[in-house]
């Protein structure tokens, strides 16, 4: 079926070159990321509604989120190995199709057990989207453009979350919450078919223009000698010190973003009195600010690179500024009303996504393209495991105390990590690169 679809696309095409093809493909990565977070965020937006309809407690909701994050963490690790084995094109198709079908099945849930099961299926598929996106950037983009490309698809996640608020609220108020899961799942199936028809590596793509081929060759994306052509064994993978530093950094800091995805919409409804309609009308502001942070973080790092700063140092400079802003996370629950939570959450989301874009780029800065999937997958697994632990902790804090301790905890994460990364990562990356020569 896949081969016949590809042949049909080829037969209808004169194979006319597409100018700036890599940026069209980056746009496709953006759409994949948008759908990834739209599917994921649908449950967060509807958490209060579903809890009331299915009589699920906060502890039960935490179990549902944990089920997703557990499979998400495990599959992040395995998805990287799978992608390095079968390739970016087929791997992305399989993952997008899987998570889209899983999201549609969520509309059949009738209690904690079934809801947790369907979200665990979603967790199996979704990590592959980001692992494949990192691998696609490594395959298509020169060093000076990688930050912008990563920022673009990272922005897609927050754009998807921004779209989810008004879209899911609109569908739910007219057709019920179950329909919202079906609609977003159908969109994902369509996108999977578009991906398998259009994506190829640059050396295999018939629509690559001569000018872009020349550029990619000049920038050592095409035609460069491979430093590593085979997958690393698990034993070799776990000896990579730069990978461990990035993994631990994301495991500690990504919980802030998981908190804003899974708990902040509930916080606005339960602690600040937002209705579903008010939530749909305002929550998008937080995620648009995160979009700006994603793009600006990658773009600014690129500017520092053009001035001659080494890639890791350029990204650490952006991350230091983000960590400074995020140190003030604990003041959010102390300010009254409904406006201040949205304003401050927008600032913190902006800062974290600038941070996330830069830390994601470390993988493509440091590791050869042949092992990007495995390295990025292991790092993503650490991120998801951190989210898993933090979700359990946040659920316990909210159940026994309030949301306030969770906000205070978030103010410590990034400042602590930036100190450790600044001291250790540049030296570890340099030592690793010397082993490739």
Image (spheres, rainbow, N blue to C red):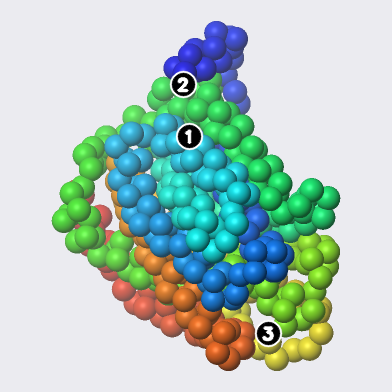
Residue annotated with mark 3: 332
Give the left or right position of residue 119, taking residue 12 as reference: left
Residue 300 visible in the current orientation: no
User: Residue 423 at x, y = what percent?
Assistant: 34, 77
Q: Is residue 329 above or below residue 234?
A: below
User: Residue 358 at x, y = what percent?
Assistant: 49, 61
Give the class, few, some or many, for how many residues have Cα within 10 Å of label 1's Cα (few <14, many ≥20).
many
Residue annotated with mark 2: 2
Q: Are marks 2 and 1 in contact (CB under 8 Å)?
A: yes
Give the class, few, some or many, for how many residues have Cα within 10 Å of label 3's Cα (few <14, many ≥20).
some
Which residue is found at the position 70% from the left and 64% from the top? 53
Q: CA distance from mark 2 to mark 1?
A: 10 Å
Q: Quadrant of residue 22?
A: top right
First in sequence, mark 3 or 2: give its number.
2
Q: CA distance from mark 3 to mark 2?
A: 50 Å
Q: Secondary structure at mark 3?
A: helix
Q: Is residue 323 above or below residue 210?
A: below
Q: Secondary structure at mark 2?
A: helix
């Amino acid at each position: 079926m896949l081969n016949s679809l590809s042949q049909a696309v080829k037969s209808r095409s004169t194979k006319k070159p597409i100018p700036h093809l890599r940026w069209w493909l980056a746009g496709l990565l953006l759409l994949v990321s948008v759908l990834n977070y739209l599917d994921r965020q649908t449950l967060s937006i509807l958490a209060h509604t579903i809890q009331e309809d299915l009589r699920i407690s906060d502890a039960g909701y935490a179990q549902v989120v944990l089920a997703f994050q557990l499979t998400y963490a495990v599959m992040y690790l395995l998805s990287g190995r799978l992608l390095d084995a079968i390739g970016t094109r087929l791997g992305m198709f399989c993952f997008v199709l899987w998570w889209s079908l899983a999201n549609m099945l969520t509309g059949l849930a009738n209690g904690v057990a079934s809801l947790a099961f369907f979200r665990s299926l979603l967790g199996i598929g979704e990590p592959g989207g980001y692992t494949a996106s990192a691998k696609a950037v490594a395959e298509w983009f020169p060093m000076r453009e990688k930050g912008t490309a990563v920022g673009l698809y990272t922005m897609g996640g927050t754009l998807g979350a921004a779209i989810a608020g008004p879209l899911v609220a609109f569908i739910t108020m007219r057709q019920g919450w179950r329909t919202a899961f079906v609609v977003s799942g159908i969109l994902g199936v369509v996108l999977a078919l578009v991906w398998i028809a259009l994506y190829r590596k640059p050396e295999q793509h018939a629509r690559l223009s001569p000018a872009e081929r020349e550029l990619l060759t000049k920038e050592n994306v095409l035609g460069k000698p491979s430093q590593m052509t085979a997958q690393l064994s698990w034993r070799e993978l776990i000896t990579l010190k730069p990978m461990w530093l990035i993994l631990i950094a994301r495991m500690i800091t990504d919980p802030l973003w998981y908190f804003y995805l899974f708990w902040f919409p509930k916080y606005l409804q339960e602690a600040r009195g937002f209705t579903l309609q008010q939530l749909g009308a305002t929550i998008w502001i937080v995620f648009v600010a995160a979009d700006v942070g994603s793009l600006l973080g990658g773009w600014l790092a690129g500017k520092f690179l053009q001035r001659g700063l080494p890639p890791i140092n350029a990204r650490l400079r952006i991350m230091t500024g983000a960590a400074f802003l995020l140190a003030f996370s604990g003041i959010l629950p102390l300010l009254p009303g409904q406006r201040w939570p949205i304003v401050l959450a927008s600032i913190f989301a902006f800062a974290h996504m600038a941070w996330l874009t830069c830390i994601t780029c470390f993988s493509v800065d440091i590791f050869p393209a042949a092992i990007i999937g495995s390295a990025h997958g292991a790092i993503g697994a650490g991120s998801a495991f951190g989210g898993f632990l933090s979700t359990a902790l946040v659920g316990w804090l909210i159940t026994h105390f309030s949301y306030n301790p969770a906000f205070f905890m978030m103010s410590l994460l990034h400042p602590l990590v930036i100190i450790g990364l600044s001291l250790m990562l540049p030296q570890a990356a340099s030592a690793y690169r010397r082993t490739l020569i």
